[in-house]
Amino acid sequence: MYRKVNIAELLAATTREPMETVASAIKSADAAKFAEAYGRLTATCNACHQATDRGFVVIQAPKISPFPDQDLRPLKP
């Protein structure tokens, strides 16, 4: 609980569909679908932060790789 808001219920209600869409995009290996789904999930998270007076917590897509010393591109045949 945060103040009078059940955070567990709020998360389940707001993120279930966007998370399922992200998972579906990953499963189908569809980069465009993933980018769109991740954007919607990010917007959902940020809207929740605003609604619960935590707007200073802003989720965004990474701008750089957290693994700068690794090249994770597939090998060329």
Image (tube, rainbow, N blue to C red):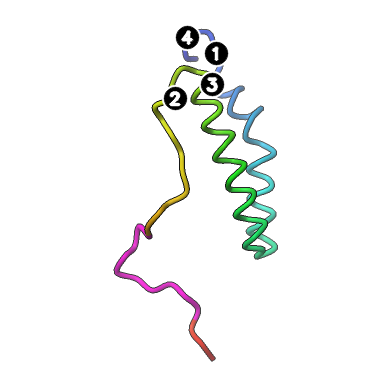
Q: Nearer the viewer, mark 3 or mark 2?
A: 2
Please give the name of the residue rendered at 59% of the width and 41% of the height, measured from the top-left corner: 41
To which quarter of the image does residue 13 belong?
Answer: top right
Q: CA distance from mark 3 to mark 1?
A: 6 Å
Residue placed furthest toward the bottom? 77
Q: Which mark is first along the chain, 2 or 4? A: 4
On the image, the x and y values in percent for residue 34 come to: 62, 55
The x and y percentages for residue 33 are: 67, 56
Label 2 sits on residue: 55
Which residue matches tag 4?
Answer: 3
Q: Are marks 4 and 1 in contact (CB under 8 Å)?
A: yes
Give me the residue at 54% from left, 21% from top: 7
Of the image marks 2 and 1, the number of the one nearer the N terminus? 1
To which residue does mark 1 refer? Answer: 5
Circle 4 SS class: loop
Above-or-below relation of 10 to 15: above
Q: CA distance from mark 4 to mark 2?
A: 16 Å
Graded by Cα atoms within 10 Å as few (under 14), some (14 to 19) or many (20 or more), the crowding at tag 3 reads some
Question: Residue 69 occupies which quadrant of the picture?
Answer: bottom left
Q: Amino acid at mark 3?
A: Ile
Residue position marked by numbered label 3 in the rendering:
7
User: Which residue is more in the foreground, 8 or 49?
Assistant: 49
Q: Position of residue 1 (x, y in %)?
A: 50, 15
What residue sits 67% from the left and 63% below the top?
Answer: 30
The reply to whether dot 4 and dot 3 touch (C-beta < 8 Å) is: no
Marks 4/3: CA distance? 10 Å
- How busy is the neighbourhood of tag 1: few (under 14 within 10 Å), some, or many (20 plus)? few
Contact? badges 3 and 1 (CB < 8 Å): yes
Q: Provide the residue span drawn in magenta.
A: 65-74
Q: Amino acid at mark 4?
A: Arg
